[in-house]
Image (cartoon, rainbow, N blue to C red):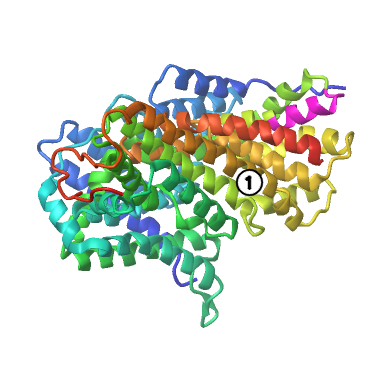
Amino acid sequence: MIISIEYFFWLAGLILLVTALLTFADRNHPRRLSTGLFWLLYALVFLIGDRIPPAIVGIGAVVMALIAGFGGVGHGKHDVLPEAERRDSAKRLGNKLFIPALLIPLVTVIGTVLFKDVKIAGLPLLDPKNVTFVSLGIGCIVALGAACWLTRDSVGQGMRESRRLTEALGWALVLPQMLAMLGLVFADAGVGKAVAHLTTAYIDMSLKLVAVMVYCVGMALFTVIMGNGFAAFPVMTGGVGVPILVGMFHANPAVMAAIGMFSGYCGTLMTPMAANFNIVPAALLELDDKNAVIRAQVPTALAILVANIALLYFLM
Amino acid sequence: MEQAVNLWPLVGVGVIILGFVLRFNPMMVVAIAAIVTGLAASMPLVQIFSAIGTAFVKARNLPLIILLPLAVIGLLERHGLREHAQNWISKIASATVGRLLIVYLAVRELTAAVGLTSLGGHPQMVRPLLAPMAEGAAENRFGHLPEPVRQRLLAFCAATDNVGLFFGEDIFVAFGAIALMHTFLLSSNIDIEPLHIAVWGIPTAVCAFLIHAVRLKRLDMWLERELGGKAPSAVPVTSGAAGTATKTGE
């Protein structure tokens, strides 16, 4: 391939390295050394993570977790333009300000839809396994160029802004990756089997409604624990869906699968384990309560779960 | 006929639940849970660290989506993107938070359903555009927002992006989840068309839209109750330095 995701790992590593160095150089930073070390370690994961022994990376990840756990990831004071200046600039630039922001999703979509299968001299242009990520990366570079041109500001200022937002996110930026790691460790250790055993072994499922409820609620609960509906689906569908809903009650497998997965998504809306959807946005929007997004979603999720049970019961 | 199932790995789940309930730092809780789970499965320590490291490197693509847009978003915010988004929405007199978010929900769900999932998202859409617009629409009606109200609005913006994405993407045939379901059912000797799985997702997708839209409508009513008495809805009493919102009347 011509444009590999590897390049964007290096770019991310570089951005984090700059963030770490700026933090080390920031004399007024309340947690200068520990914060700098945290971002430096994270930068190394991107720059050389696949070239050093995995056990070293593992120890690095645990050290990062300890720094975060003991409150070592802080943020400094960042200079922002005064409110009046921002308003002037907003007035002057007007709707043009939307252009770079919209360029990111636009370029991503163009990349994923139009350039997905483009080949140059037999080589795929975009990393075929990571088309979305690579397109997004290109979108961000294009948008940064447009933003610099539009605002007459420098890439260096862009780096400082990136550091401001990275520090506002703090450890929440790393959490999705930690949770994905935990999911793999859970799978290795057989957590799925144990949970499926607990949800299915003690309930009498000779009533159709009970079986439907066990399947849907089980999908949601399992997703709450694992943070991911994809991990729950094989376990619950193998344990309840196929043998009982299809085997005993002759459900349409397509209906069962579709509604089962959506029941899992109800779980995703309710769990801090799905950090990239629930915890990261709370950090990005700088909310005091890291669970505020989950709180806003729980009533919707529960109502959809009930709707799913009814739909599966009547449609299967 | 029951096979003995090893329940020890569940200790890791226990650590997670305990850690979140006691509000320890989630990153540390997750690291400890991984180590405890490994120990419960009687893995040696070096192997546990190796497993953690391998998985950590494998998941490096996750933070890219969040990290890479930050420079652009930060730069635009420095030059007034949020202020402009607020002004822009204040020109639409009929805009309320609920209506804005219902439109966003519909667009997000429909575009996700045809595979355009990257049109939304928290770093590139919610923080720079949707959140300031929702804030602007509310301030336009009710004047200065008390902090808890403002934070609730922002949480709803993020929630709406999630609901729209989740219940839209799964009715797109080429989406990964459909392939996963299809493959798994094949392994259980059930062969169904992926298209059928996608189509049977539509009833839930419709329910999800209706349920969340009703909640957004009620969010408007809640705002009206909380703040409606303080400022007449037609006159935007914008706070402090927000002098540029000079629109009056409907």
Q: Is residue B164 left or right of residue A308?
A: left
Q: Check the image and report above or below for A195 versus A130.
A: above
Q: Is residue A297 visible?
A: yes
Task: Classify residue A172 by image quadrant.
Answer: top left
Task: Classify residue A247 by image quadrant.
Answer: top right
Q: Is residue B226 left or right of residue B161?
A: left
Q: Check the image and report above or below for A296 versus B121.
A: above
Helix, strand or loop for the magenta stretch, by majority:
helix
Q: Residue at x 21, y 39 (%)?
A: B237
Please provide percent x and percent y for residue B21. 46, 18
Q: Residue at x 45, y 65 (%)?
A: A4
Please provide percent x and percent y for residue A193. 70, 29
Residue on which disc 1 sits: B205
Task: Classify residue A282 by image quadrant.
Answer: top left
Q: Chain of mark 1?
A: B
Q: Quadrant of the C terminus of chain A?
A: top right
Magenta stretch in the rendered image: A205-216
Q: Residue at x 66, y 43 (%)?
A: B204
Please provide percent x and percent y for residue B135. 31, 42
Q: Which one is nearer the viewer's eye here, B7 or B26?
A: B26
Q: Is residue A211 magenta?
A: yes
Please provide percent x and percent y for residue A8. 39, 59
Q: Which one is nearer the viewer's eye here, A185 or A297?
A: A297
Q: Is residue A290 visible?
A: no
Q: Which one is nearer the viewer's eye here, B7 or B185?
A: B185
Q: Is residue B10 magenta?
A: no
Query: How many circles with numbers are drawn on the protein?
Result: 1
User: Which residue type carries mark 1?
Assistant: Ala
